[in-house]
Amino acid sequence: MRKFILAFLLIRIAVFSATPYLVVHDVSTWFHPPEYHTFSLVSLFHYQSDFYTFYPFEKNLEEILQLAGHLVSYSSLSVSFFLTFKKIPIHRRFMITWGFSSFVGLLDEWNQFFIVGRDGRLVDFLLHSFSSFITLLLILAFIYLKGQMLTYFKDKKSPDVNTNL
């Protein structure tokens, strides 16, 4: 089931990434075939490329929804990756999950750079990576606290040797 959810999330990110003129609050814009710019891969790596520029944050509904979509998508992707790699030790699983989630975010933004009506930005990639990192830190904190609580309650149930005195 974990692998199915992971595959679903990856497909969902790929579909929304390739949708031209996506408007989050308008469902009718969510599913359109991709239309590509005639840019070359060289234009992506050009130092004056739009990929490396910030965009103005106007605090309108659309941009807030896009920001929330980025955070939720990459947080859920991180949780799904983390749960899928159960047999790997936690510290390595953290790094692998963060690496995979960040790599998917980079591919997502590269793809959006070439889609008409979309603009892939390095800033969005950093947002993907940051949301993944924070989600994984929260997971690790939860695992640590869960272990601490189990140890605490286990110690409470053990009989005290000095109770007969």
Image: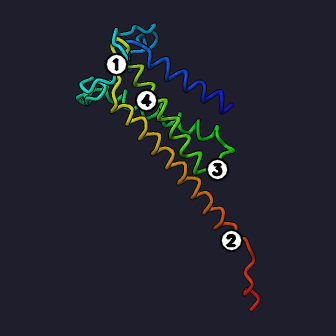
Instruction: Look at discs 3 and 2 and give the one toward the viewer.
Output: 3
Instruction: Look at discs 4 and 1 and give the one toward the viewer.
Output: 1
Q: Determine whether, in the image, residue 141 is placed left or right of residue 119.
A: right
Residue 129, disc: none
- Ranked by sequence position, the earlier of labels 4 and 1 is 1
Callout 3, which amino acid?
A: Pro
The picture quadrant where one finds residue 85 is top right
- Within 10 angstroms of label 2, few (less than 14), some, or many (20 or more) residues? few
Is there a contact, CB below 8 Å, between mark 1 and mark 2?
Answer: no
Badge 2 is on which residue?
155
Which residue appears at 38% of the width and 14% of the height? 115
Quadrant of the snapshot with the N terminus: top right
The picture quadrant where one finds residue 80 is top right
* Tag 1 secondary structure: helix
Which residue appears at 69% of the width and 44% of the height? 87
Which residue appears at 26% of the width and 29% of the height? 53
Badge 1 is on which residue?
42
- Ranked by sequence position, the earlier of labels 3 and 1 is 1
Q: Determine whether, in the image, residue 151 is placed left or right of residue 11.
A: right
Badge 4 is on which residue?
106
- Ranked by sequence position, the earlier of labels 3 and 2 is 3
Q: How is the image coloured?
A: rainbow
Callout 4, which amino acid?
A: Leu
Disc 3 to disc 4, C-alpha distance: 25 Å
Callout 1, which amino acid?
A: Val
Badge 3 is on which residue?
89
Is there a contact, CB below 8 Å, between mark 3 and mark 4?
Answer: no
* Tag 3 secondary structure: loop
- Ranked by sequence position, the earlier of labels 1 and 2 is 1
Which residue appears at 43% of the width and 29% of the height? 106
